[in-house]
């Protein structure tokens, strides 16, 4: 079975400051990893994904994440946030063969002016 | 391609009533997934289809819940005898097994409120 833990439920940050949203996962099989963003009353939008290759992956809106197999982590970072980045962020895993996504509990990013 | 669509976007119903939601996946996608998201939580998997076949169901999917995908295109999720605990956002996603099967594209969701 797989599980995902997002270590921070809320992250307040000032505009133009850097931010890191933390995600740890547990799995007995190989998995792929994702970060999704959800704006209020909307569905989920894919930010970035790690399937294989370079452990540093870049996504949309200036976000990037680093896959660390030894620490079973996949933390999301952005060097300078904007007000428009205020949203809920979800880390998720899926088995290599596909099927269901397993999500973390979410991290609410609140960017203040 | 207009993406995954879901109807209705919002549904308010009284406890005990039946409700049905519809999901239309991206046209070439043969896999379709249903998730439920309660307030302040991440989405939880309910079930998924490949073409018409329902390949996996979560134990969250009680006998009051039924999902169908009769022609391998759109899908419906029905909840019978709704309870207040069914209040949630119901999300649909789709993917293509022939390409990268792990990448799922989500619809805007249907928000259900049971009064």
Image (spheres, coloured by chain):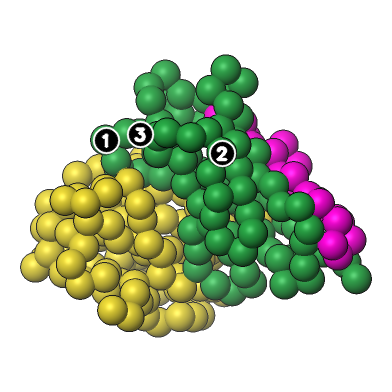
Chain colours: A green, B yellow
Which residue is tagged 1? A97
Alpha carbon distance from label 1 to label 2: 22 Å
Alpha carbon distance from label 3 to label 1: 5 Å
Q: Residue B69 vs residue A57: left or right?
A: left
Residue B65 position by quadrant = bottom left
Rendered-image quadrant of the C terminus of chain A:
bottom right
Image position of A37 with respect to A43: above or below = above
Residue A112 position by quadrant = bottom right
Which label sits in the foreground, 1 or 2?
2
Rendered-image quadrant of the N terminus of chain A:
top left
Q: Which residues are magenta?
A: A5-25
Magenta span: predominant SS is strand
User: Where residue A12 appears, x then y in whole percent?
Assistant: 85, 55
Q: Can residue B52 be seen in the rendering of this structure?
A: yes
Q: Residue at x 52, y 33 (%)?
A: A55
Which residue is tagged 2? A56
In this orientation, which residue lies closer to the viewer: A53 or A40?
A53
Q: Secondary structure at mark 2?
A: strand
Magenta stretch holds residue A16: yes
Which label sits in the foreground, 3 or 2?
2
Q: Residue at x 12, y 64 (%)?
A: B72
Picture disc at residue A33 = none
Does the CB distance between marks 3 and 1 fall below 8 Å?
A: yes
Chain to which mark 2 belongs: A
Chain to which mark 3 belongs: A
Q: Residue A30 vs residue A110: left or right?
A: left
Point out the tag, 3 or 2, that comes first from the N-terminus. Answer: 2
Which residue is tagged 3? A95
Q: Residue at x 30, y 42 (%)?
A: A99
Q: Residue B10 vs residue B53: left or right?
A: right
């Amino acid at each position: 079975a797989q599980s995902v833990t997002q270590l921070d439920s809320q992250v307040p940050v000032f505009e133009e400051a850097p931010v890191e949203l933390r995600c740890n996962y547990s799995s007995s099989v190989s998995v792929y990893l994702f970060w999704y963003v959800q704006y209020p009353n909307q569905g989920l939008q894919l930010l970035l994904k790690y399937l294989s290759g370079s452990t540093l992956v870049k996504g949309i809106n200036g976000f990037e994440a680093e896959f660390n197999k030894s620490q079973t982590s996949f933390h999301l970072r952005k060097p300078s946030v904007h007000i428009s980045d205020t949203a809920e962020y979800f880390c998720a895993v899926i088995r290599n063969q596909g099927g269901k996504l397993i999500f973390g509990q979410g991290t609410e990013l609140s960017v203040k002016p | 391609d207009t993406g995954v669509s879901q109807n209705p976007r919002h549904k308010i119903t009284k406890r005990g009533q039946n409700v049905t939601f519809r999901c239309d996946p991206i046209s070439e996608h043969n896999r379709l997934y249903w998730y439920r998201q309660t307030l302040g939580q991440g989405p939880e998997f309910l079930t998924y289809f490949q073409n018409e076949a329902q390949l996996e169901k979560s134990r969250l999917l009680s006998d009051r819940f039924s999902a169908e995908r009769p022609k391998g295109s759109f899908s419906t999720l029905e909840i019978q005898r709704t309870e207040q605990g069914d209040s949630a956002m119901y999300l649909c996603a789709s993917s293509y097994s022939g390409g990268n099967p792990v990448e799922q594209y989500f619809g805007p969701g249907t928000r259900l409120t049971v009064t």
